[in-house]
Image (cartoon, helix red, strand yellow):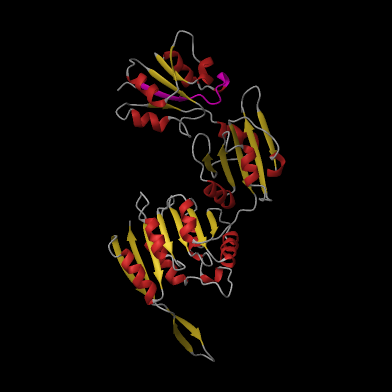
């Protein structure tokens, strides 16, 4: 079957970086789709469709006959237009020609391999800042495609406390005005770079913590601040059914143990830890810092007021409501998207209130947990000491 559509990576847009296969495709194409950056690669006798509004451009392509070539920057397999082309033309036998990406050139300039690098893009898309910083903490190499907002300066400002980080910045790589710089994050805080830049962060002090779920002994503690028992916490996390893209409200965060475990398990998710006790909020921050977690945002104040200004959650855990449970649920049922709610109750009064608020919701269930742990007495004697039973209620809005 003939390929009607070919997607070709043209690298930096320099003729020197075109592969022979892509050059042949340009010569043989009947129609070439390109933005203004690459028109210098196209012979004058070719019909050109300007790559502008995607819907309009793809509609024009559908009305064309013959061989259609779509030119994309860098490599077609790396943050390119290819997924959209496949979506709009699902029945086409699309051919893909690889190109030389700025990522490859940057790593070559830096004399660094990139097979183990984690790759992010803030170019024309939303960047999950917490996930980006968590990744830098935990990996030897991280690469970021920049834009006007998520610029090299922005990244270096976020990384200025990473004392062992090396930064490699590239702009116009392979072109006449190429920029390639190496240094520490603080070296570039007052420098401006072109919008289409790329940076490689080399972390020489990778943070390693092998536990998916930290135990009680791993947390910093303060005597007057309650922490959910690690056995109960494991059930809570299971009942929450979190995913990497979840947005969690941890209401009544206490020591931050649920926030930390959730954030540590899913480094890309966003956690909002809500706490009215200033000492507890400080402890949440200390524990988030101990585990090098950047995807926890701490909010001090009454939950009913704070949640008015937060982005909508996908999941909510209520460990302590400060007497505001009805107000909190009034707010939750107004949220348009479905929300998974889990609450833990120790007293009968709190259980009764939560039960009445949740019993008519979808997928409602209750689970009682009674944890008994061993305690060494004098000599060789071991006592099994019971903790207070906890009732966990789950439902879906």
Residue 390 within the magenta-colored segment of the rendering: no
Based on the displayed image, in which of its 4 quarters is residue 369 positioned? bottom left
- The percent coordinates of residue 252 (x first, y second) are 48, 65
- Place of residue 123 in the rendered image (x, y in percent of width and height, measured from the top left): 53, 35
Q: In this view, does 283 lie above or below 146?
A: below
- Measured as percent of width and height from the top left, residue 377 is found at 52, 89
Whether the magenta-drawn stretch holds residue 9 is answered as: yes
x then y, percent, for residue 245: 43, 49
Q: How many labels does the image show?
A: 0
Q: Nearer the viewer, residue 276 or 3?
A: 276
Q: Give the range drawn in magenta.
A: 5-16
Query: Residue sitting at 43 percent across and 50 percent down?
Result: 312
Q: Nearer the viewer, residue 73 or 93?
A: 73
Q: Quadrant of the C terminus?
A: bottom left
Q: Which residue is drawn at 48% across and 18% down?
A: 23
Residue that extends furthest to the bottom in the rendered view of this protein: 379
162 vs 361, nearest the viewer: 361
Looking at the image, which residue sits at the far top?
Answer: 45
Residue at (34, 52) in percent of width and height: 338
Which quadrant of the rendered structure holds the N terminus?
top left
Tell me, yes or no, if residue 212 can be seen here: no
Residue 280 in sight from this viewpoint = yes
Q: Is residue 30 left or right of residue 305?
A: left
Question: Does residue 43 sit above or below 169 in this rendering?
Answer: above
Frontmost residue, 186 versus 4: 186
- Decide: is 384 above or below 209: below
Q: Residue at x 35, y 55 (%)?
A: 333
């Amino acid at each position: 079957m003939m390929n009607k559509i070919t997607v070709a990576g043209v690298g930096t847009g320099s003729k020197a970086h075109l592969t022979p296969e892509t050059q042949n495709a340009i010569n043989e194409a009947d129609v070439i789709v390109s933005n203004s950056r690459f028109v210098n690669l196209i012979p004058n006798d070719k019909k050109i469709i300007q790559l502008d509004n995607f819907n309009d451009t793809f509609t024009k392509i559908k009305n064309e006959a013959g061989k259609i070539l779509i030119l994309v920057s860098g490599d077609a397999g790396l943050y390119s237009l290819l997924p959209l082309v496949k979506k709009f033309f699902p029945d086409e036998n699309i051919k893909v020609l690889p190109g030389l990406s700025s990522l490859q050139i940057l790593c070559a300039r830096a004399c660094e391999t990139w097979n183990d690098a984690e790759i992010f893009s803030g170019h024309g898309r939303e960047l999950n800042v917490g996930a980006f910083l968590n990744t830098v903490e935990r990996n030897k190499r991280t690469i970021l495609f920049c834009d006007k907002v998520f610029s090299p300066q922005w990244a270096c400002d976020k990384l200025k406390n990473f004392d062992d980080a090396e930064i490699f910045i590239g702009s116009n790589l392979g072109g006449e005005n190429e920029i390639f710089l190496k240094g520490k994050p603080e070296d570039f805080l007052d420098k401006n770079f072109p919008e289409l830049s790329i940076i490689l962060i080399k972390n020489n002090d990778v943070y390693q913590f092998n536990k998916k779920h930290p135990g009680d002994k791993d947390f910093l503690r303060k005597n007057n601040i309650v922490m959910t028992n690690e056995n109960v916490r494991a059930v809570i996390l299971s009942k929450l059914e979190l995913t990497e893209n979840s947005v969690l409200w941890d209401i009544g965060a206490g020591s931050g143990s649920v926030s930390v475990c959730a954030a540590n398990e899913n480094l890309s998710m966003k956690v909002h830890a809500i706490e009215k006790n200033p000492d507890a909020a400080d402890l949440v921050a200390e524990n988030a810092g101990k585990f090098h977690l950047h995807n926890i945002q701490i909010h001090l104040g009454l939950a009913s007021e704070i949640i008015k200004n937060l982005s909508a959650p996908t999941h909510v855990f209520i460990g302590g409501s400060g007497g505001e449970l009805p107000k909190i649920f009034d707010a939750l049922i107004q949220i348009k998207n479905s929300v998974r709610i889990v609450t833990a109750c120790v007293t009968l009064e709190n259980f009764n209130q939560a039960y009445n608020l949740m019993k008519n919701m979808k997928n409602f269930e209750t689970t009682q947990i009674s944890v008994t742990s061993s305690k060494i007495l004098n000599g060789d004697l071991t006592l099994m000491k019971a903790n207070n039973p906890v009732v966990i209620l789950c439902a879906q809005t």
